[in-house]
Image (spheres, rainbow, N blue to C red):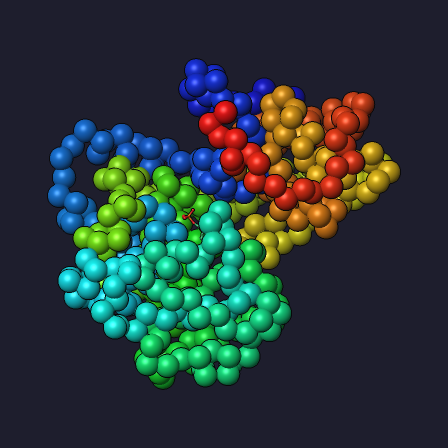
């Protein structure tokens, strides 16, 4: 087996951090992304320099426009920040006094933001809070299993500022209105549609489908530093950008993140997407052959639920394995090195192995961890079922 090349292992040791192997996806709680070399170089280069921030953001706007097809764009702290700033912009327009008075005083301006109930997700924080931080008032449309066109059309009043449309595996995956259906309702009524596309690979499709603003994370597929991108209609992008003089201040992005994500966007255009897919496929093949015949484990390859060009291995954990999916994930996380799997569906009896954030050699480390775990005595928590508890959050910093 080739020895793994684990980058950044030194700083992790120095800080007393575990050298985790991430097969869960681009997760904030694991550090958001492997920042690509182009972005790291740009961040290091700009870090000691004075620059004029509005000019840097003008350059970023041009780069974001080139990649998204939007008329303009800017960089903010993260996608959640971008949602707040986009919503705030639809409330204030270009009125700078209104910008300063948010979020509790909207001066009687329309501030209702319509959200399909099945889109009311938590991505580490509840999405409605990103709306409320901006002075918006969420109006839920439909139910968890169904939204009909009238649920949105009849919810639109002279109080409506925007419709927020969320594209994610977190949301209800059926019965919801698609973006083109939402646009067909909103366009004739002049209501802006904001798309949360934090974790989507296609940088153009949502604006092409008629969204007015789209918000991405810079640290998910793009492999940039922690950051968010807002793109779309120029007047709305400007209205969102001027929130830097208001609620956006607490969401400030540094010059290093702007330069870093611009470099990541340049790199995205040149990236060998096919080669990356092939490397991911070889990790999937290795894991499938490793899991084949392991008692009580059933593996299959499943496509990404929102049609990103990414497959994962779904591992169904049956009692014959001596584990539950929860116990298995916990045991892998306790291994050396710790392997963190995608376990948000553990109560359904399965977890996923995500191949998109691996350093060279780590696919083999994961395969070895699977073999070792199945050969070892079962830990006392092996048959645990998921317990939803926030005790860990409340124990920090101990
Ligand atoms: C990750 C995610 C977010 C939050 O993105 P950040 O850039 O981490 O703030 C918002 N919406 C969806 C759908 C996400 O997947």
Q: Residue at x 45, y 82 (%)?
A: 153
Using the image as rendered, state which of residue 159 and residue 330 is in the foreground.
159
Left or right: residue 194 versus residue 5 is left
334 over 131 or under it: above or below: above
Residue located 54% across and 53% down the image: 309
Q: Which residue: 42% across, 66% down?
A: 138
Q: Residue furthest top?
A: 14
* Horizontal and vertical percent position of residue 107: 22, 69
Q: Quadrant of residue 258?
A: top left
Query: In this image, 348 relative to 222: left or right?
Result: right
Residue beneath the point at 59% across and 67% down: 144
Inspect this view and state whether residue 129 appears. yes
Among the 4 quarters of the image, the one containing residue 286: top right
Classify residue 154 as left or right of residue 279.
left
Closest to the observer: 31 or 357? 31
Which quadrant would the N terminus be assigned to in this image? Answer: top right
Q: Nearer the viewer, residue 375 or 203?
A: 375
Q: Is residue 158 above or below residue 357?
A: below
């Amino acid at each position: 087996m080739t020895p793994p090349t684990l980058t950044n292992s030194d700083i992790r040791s120095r800080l007393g951090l575990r050298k985790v192997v991430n097969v869960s996806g681009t997760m904030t709680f694991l550090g958001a992304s492997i920042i690509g070399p182009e972005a790291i170089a740009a961040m290091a280069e700009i870090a000691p320099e004075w620059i004029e921030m509005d000019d840097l953001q003008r350059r970023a706007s041009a780069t974001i426009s080139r990649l998204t097809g939007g008329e303009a764009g800017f960089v903010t702290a993260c996608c959640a920040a971008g949602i707040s700033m986009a919503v705030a912009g639809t409330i204030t327009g270009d009125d700078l006094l209104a910008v300063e008075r948010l979020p509790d005083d909207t001066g009687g301006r329309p501030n209702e933001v319509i959200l399909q109930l099945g889109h009311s997700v938590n991505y580490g924080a509840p999405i409605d809070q990103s709306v409320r931080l901006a002075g918006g008032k969420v109006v839920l449309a439909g139910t968890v299993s169904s939204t009909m066109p009238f649920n949105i059309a009849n919810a639109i009043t002279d109080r409506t500022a925007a419709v927020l449309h969320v594209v994610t595996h977190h949301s209800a995956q059926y019965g919801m209105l698609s973006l083109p259906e939402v646009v067909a309702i909103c366009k004739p009524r002049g209501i802006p549609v904001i798309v949360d596309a934090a974790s989507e690979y296609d940088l153009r499709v949502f604006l092409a489908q008629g969204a007015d603003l789209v918000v991405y994370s810079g640290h998910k597929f793009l492999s940039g530093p922690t950051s968010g991108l807002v793109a779309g209609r120029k007047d709305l992008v400007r209205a969102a950008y001027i929130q830097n003089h208001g609620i956006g201040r607490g969401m400030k992005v540094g010059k290093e993140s702007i330069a870093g994500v611009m470099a990541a966007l340049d790199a995205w255009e040149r990236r060998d997407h096919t080669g990356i897919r092939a490397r991911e496929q070889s990790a999937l093949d290795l894991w499938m052959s490793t899991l084949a015949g392991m008692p009580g484990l059933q593996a299959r390859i499943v496509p990404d639920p929102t049609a990103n060009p990414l497959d994962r291995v779904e591992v169904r954990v049956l009692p014959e394995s001596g584990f539950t999916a929860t116990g298995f994930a916990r045991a892998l996380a306790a291994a050396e090195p710790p392997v963190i799997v995608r376990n948000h569906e553990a109560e359904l009896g399965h977890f996923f192995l995500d191949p998109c954030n691996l350093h060279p050699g780590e696919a083999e480390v994961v395969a070895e961890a699977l073999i070792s775990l199945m050969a070892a005595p079962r830990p006392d928590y092996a048959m645990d079922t998921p317990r939803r508890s926030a005790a860990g959050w409340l124990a920090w910093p101990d």
